[in-house]
Amino acid sequence: MVKQVSAPIISNTEILPHTYLVWAQAPEITSIAQPGQFVMVRCGESYDPLLRRPFSIHRVANGGQMALLFNIVGRGTEWLSQCQEGDSLDLLGPLGRGFSFQSASHRLLLVAGGIGIAPLVFLAEKALGEGRSITLLIGAQNASLLYPESLLPPSIKLITATEDGSEGKKGMVTELMADFAAQADQVFACGPTSMYQSIAAQHYLKGKSVQISLEVRMGCGLGACYGCTIKTKRGLRQVCQDGPVFELNDIFW
């Protein structure tokens, strides 16, 4: 059930250049949220900007705390980056269809391109709590933009790639997948469209479940405006209601 809540901010920290981690108190949402779902945030004191902004639920913690991870990309996220402890966020959520585990999936491969790490940490923490193992591949342009390892659960196996070679393997994160996909029971990914297109072209993933979280512009987040409609092999689907998580092989690229 979708809730609209006023969530007091606990902290708001710039953890990477122009990338912020905000924690808020939202037990009404965290009590029912699932990895891969998102919230719509009113990013302003009034109705300017008019539309809410969608953010993946990055983490949840005991006591009803919820984290959002975001880059500054416009007026809405600029406003959000300036919020401080004690301010409140107007949240609507949890929304959308999240990730799902196959019953026999014990070894999971997670692939994050840049800010695509946002929905995958919540997923990893739930999987670890169920006794599954996690290998996480993270890619970024350079070392300064890699998600801090100190913020990840210690039992995750982390492999990194940077485009300039400043940390981990030099190249794209998708170039790491061939070394780990064969051992994985299931694959989960989040990143730009170009990353998904590259993954979809890999023959070694044929027959394997690969769930992706699509990042698209949304108007309402509730399925009323049809602004996030995409074409899939099962017909037209709305990312906000039918997703944001889809099977990779269901999407037309």
Image (spheres, rainbow, N blue to C red):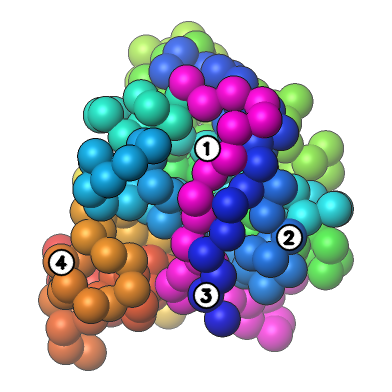
User: Which residue type carries mark 3?
Assistant: Val
- Looking at the image, do the residues carrying marks 3 and 4 touch, with CB atoms under 8 Å apart? no
**Image quadrant in which the N terminus is located:** bottom right
**Badge 4 element:** loop
**Badge 1 element:** strand
Task: Name the residue furthest bottom.
Answer: 234
Q: CA distance from mark 3 to mark 2?
A: 13 Å
User: Which residue type carries mark 4?
Assistant: Gly
The location of residue 107, given as percent across then percent down, is: 70, 64
Pointer 2 residue: 27
Disc 3 vs disc 4: which is toward the camera? 3
Q: CA distance from mark 1 to mark 4?
A: 23 Å
Mark 2: give few (<14), some (14-19) or many (20+) Cα within 10 Å: some
- Looking at the image, do the residues carrying marks 3 and 2 touch, with CB atoms under 8 Å apart? no
- Indicate which disc, 3 or 2, sits on the residue closer to the N terminus: 3
- Indicate which disc, 2 or 1, sits on the residue closer to the N terminus: 2
Mark 4: give few (<14), some (14-19) or many (20+) Cα within 10 Å: some
Q: Is residue 164 left or right of residue 61?
A: left
- Indicate which disc, 1 or 4, sits on the residue closer to the N terminus: 1
Q: Residue 33: in sight, yes or no?
A: yes
Pointer 1 residue: 69
Pointer 3 residue: 2
Q: CA distance from mark 1 to mark 3?
A: 21 Å
Q: Residue 109: in sight, yes or no?
A: no
User: Which residue type carries mark 1?
Assistant: Leu
The location of residue 8, given as percent across then percent down, is: 66, 41
